[in-house]
Amino acid sequence: MSPHPDSSHDGTGRIGPGPGLGEGLPGGGRPRAAAPPYVLTEDTPVYVISVAAELSGLHPQTLRQYDRLGLVSPDRTAGRGRRYSARDIQQLREVQRLSQDEGINLAGIKRIIELENQVAALQSRVAELVDALESAAATLQQREAAVHASYRRDLVPYQQVQQSSALVVWRPKR
């Protein structure tokens, strides 16, 4: 008896789900690799336009207009349907807030979004450059330490120089 009603035992010691799609058919039979688990992030496009409109408090036609104007650009399905992410919903709310509460027109909002995106890109680039700089500094320190370790101290006797605070007056000979 199989350990799970939906699993089968194929005699190879492998216990798993029953035959996969295409197994037992001409051209099938190749075991498929397990699909990686689906990760849902705030950038994952999951909401259709009606749900996005409800979540943002806007009319679907307003969302279509914002898409045409380039204010919020959702991903598209193969059939060209719009799919909004949680980040898109947040941006729709921000566009609505700027328009309603601050009285900014849509062209101004588009410029604000462009500038915010530019700032974010520049901040990301600065972070990359800081990482590269820190990496280069660490490499430089390692190389410097390697050079100092390679000195041959047996060629020249090394003596620590004592620092003195004595004052010496020099007078030129006449």
Image: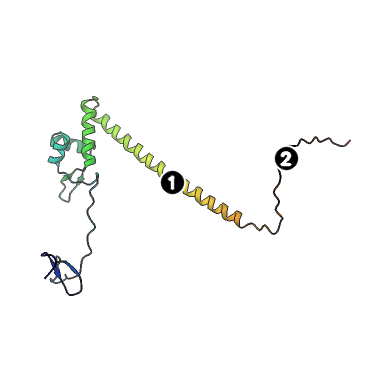
Color encoding of the figure: rainbow
Relative to the observer, which residue lies in front, 25 or 148? 148
Q: Residue at 20% across / 68% down in the picture?
A: 31
Q: Classify residue 149 as left or right of residue 63.
A: right
Under circle 1, the secondary element is helix
Circle 2 residues within 10 Å: few <14, some 14–19, many ≥20: few
Q: Nearer the viewer, residue 65 or 132?
A: 132
How many residues crowd mark 1 within 10 Å: few (<14), some (14–19), many (20+)? few
Q: Tell me which corner region of the image, top left, top right, bottom left or bottom right, holds residue 21.
A: bottom left
Q: Quadrant of the N terminus?
A: bottom left
Instruction: Tell me, yes or no, whether the two marked residues, 2 and 1, touch with CB atoms within 8 Å.
Output: no
> Compared to 91, does 30 lie above or below?
below
Determine if residue 35 is in view.
yes
Does residue 31 lie above or below 149 as drawn? below
Identify the secondary structure beneath mark 2: loop
> Of the residues under marks 2 and 1, which one precedes in the sequence?
1
Residue 166, disc? none
Q: Position of residue 171 (x, y in %)?
A: 83, 35
> Image quarter for residue 42?
top left
Residue at label 1?
A: 131
Q: Position of residue 95 (x, y in %)?
A: 23, 32
> Residue flagged by tag 2: what amino acid is it?
Ser
**For the residue marked with disc 1, what is the amino acid?**
Asp
Residue receiving disc 2? 164
Count every numbered label the image shows and give the total: 2
C-alpha gap between disc 2 and disc 1:
43 Å
> On the rendered image, what quadrant is the C terminus found in?
top right
**Res. 69 visible in picture:** no
